[in-house]
Image (spheres, rainbow, N blue to C red):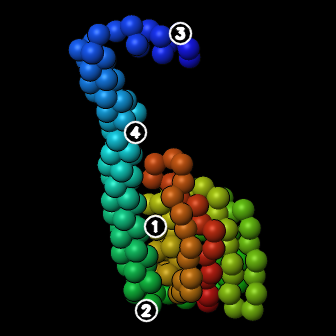
């Protein structure tokens, strides 16, 4: 530090001003490139991700509403709710990770399923087997077009 101060004092006044001005410009450059610009890029990226998630959520909500409003006049299937679910899920390549029957309801957990196949399967259950969807909680999976269903409660 002592050597730096000695060097500073050995400079002419104009050189000192030039170095201070250059140092100020350098500090501003570091701030802009190291802090300001990455923050702006992160905000833009997060904003785009949020818009995509909101669009996906809106699409999922409308699809779920369509399933819930499906024609209840469909033929009523014989058999228990568990049997209906087990016989229909294979056609849509749906693997259940948990199935908990309780009274007239069935709670399901599905780890990874293509969203379109899930919608088709639920539509079949509602229209052909007179099953109603009481509740569904899902989230986006890491794979595009896939979801994780943490809770699906069906009732017959």
Q: Secondary structure at mark 2?
A: loop
Mark 2 — residue?
A: 73
Q: Is residue 109 left or right of residue 144?
A: right
Name the residue located 63 percent from the left edge and 73 percent from the top edge.
Answer: 151
Q: Which mark is residue 48?
A: none
Mark whose residue sits in front, 3 or 1: 3
Mark 3 — residue?
A: 3
Relative to 128, residue 36 above or below: above
Relative to 31, residue 138 above or below: below
Whether residue 97 is visible, yes or no, is: yes
Circle 3/circle 4 CB separation < 8 Å:
no
Q: Quadrant of the C terminus?
A: bottom right
Q: Could you say where residue 47 lies in the image, as x and y percent from the top left?
A: 34, 55
Q: Secondary structure at mark 1?
A: helix
Mark earlier in primary sequence (4, 2): 4
Most foreground residue, 14 or 27? 14
- Cα distance between the residues tagged 4 and 1: 48 Å
Mark 1 — residue?
A: 120
Q: Secondary structure at mark 4?
A: helix
């Amino acid at each position: 530090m002592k050597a730096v101060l000695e060097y500073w004092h050995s400079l002419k006044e104009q050189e000192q001003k030039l170095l201070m001005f250059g140092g100020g410009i350098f500090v501003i450059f570091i701030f802009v490139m190291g802090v300001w610009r990455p923050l702006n890029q992160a905000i833009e990226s997060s904003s785009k991700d949020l818009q995509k998630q909101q669009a996906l959520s809106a699409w999922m909500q409308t699809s779920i509403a369509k399933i819930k409003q499906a024609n209840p006049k469909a033929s009523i299937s014989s058999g228990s709710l568990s049997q209906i679910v087990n016989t229909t899920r294979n056609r849509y390549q749906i693997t259940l990770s948990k199935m908990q029957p309780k009274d007239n309801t069935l709670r399901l957990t599905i780890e990874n399923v293509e969203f379109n196949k899930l919608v088709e399967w639920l539509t079949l259950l509602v229209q052909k087997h007179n099953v109603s969807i009481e509740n569904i909680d899902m989230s986006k999976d890491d794979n595009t077009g896939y979801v994780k269903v943490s809770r699906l409660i069906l009732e017959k």
